[in-house]
Image (cartoon, helix red, strand yellow):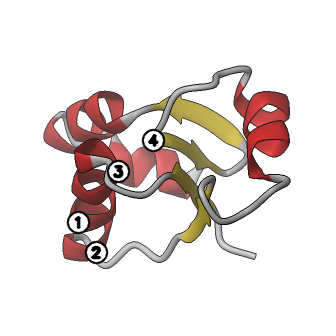
Amino acid sequence: MSQVTVYTTDRCPFCRSAKTLLDRRQIAYEEINLARDPDGREQLSRVTGMHTFPQIVIGGRSIGGFTELLAADRAGRLAQLLAA
């Protein structure tokens, strides 16, 4: 199981941006596409308490959506989150 989980849906520009950022940083992740996974929404709610997407979970901890992922990357905190 991957340390990073990204909850996404189809046709979501922020979801694509989050996956692109992770791909560029060569960070492996598990994608749970809520449009294709019938249990995904329940899992999203249980794990993050949120119903919006994308939602990024690192090491079992929800960090938020694309905006929070980008902010962590720009501040140099993404590596720290992955190391925790």
Judge depth for marks 1 and 3 and give the one in front. Answer: 3
N-terminal of the pair, mark 2 or mark 4, is: 2
Pointer 3: what residue?
15
N-terminal of the pair, mark 4 or mark 3, is: 3
Instruction: Give the spatial CA distance, label 2 vs label 4.
Output: 15 Å
Height in image: 81 above or below 25? above
Secondary element under disc 1, as helix, strand or loop, is helix
- The three-letter code of the residue at mark 2 reads Asp
Pointer 4: what residue?
54
Tell me residue 79's x, y (percent): 37, 54
On residue 56, the disc is none
On residue 23, the disc is 2
Tell me residue 34's x, y (percent): 63, 53
| Marks 1,3: beta carbons within 8 A | no
N-terminal of the pair, mark 1 or mark 4, is: 1
Instruction: Give the spatial CA distance, label 1 vs label 4.
Output: 12 Å
Tell me residue 18's x, y (percent): 30, 53
- The three-letter code of the residue at mark 3 reads Cys
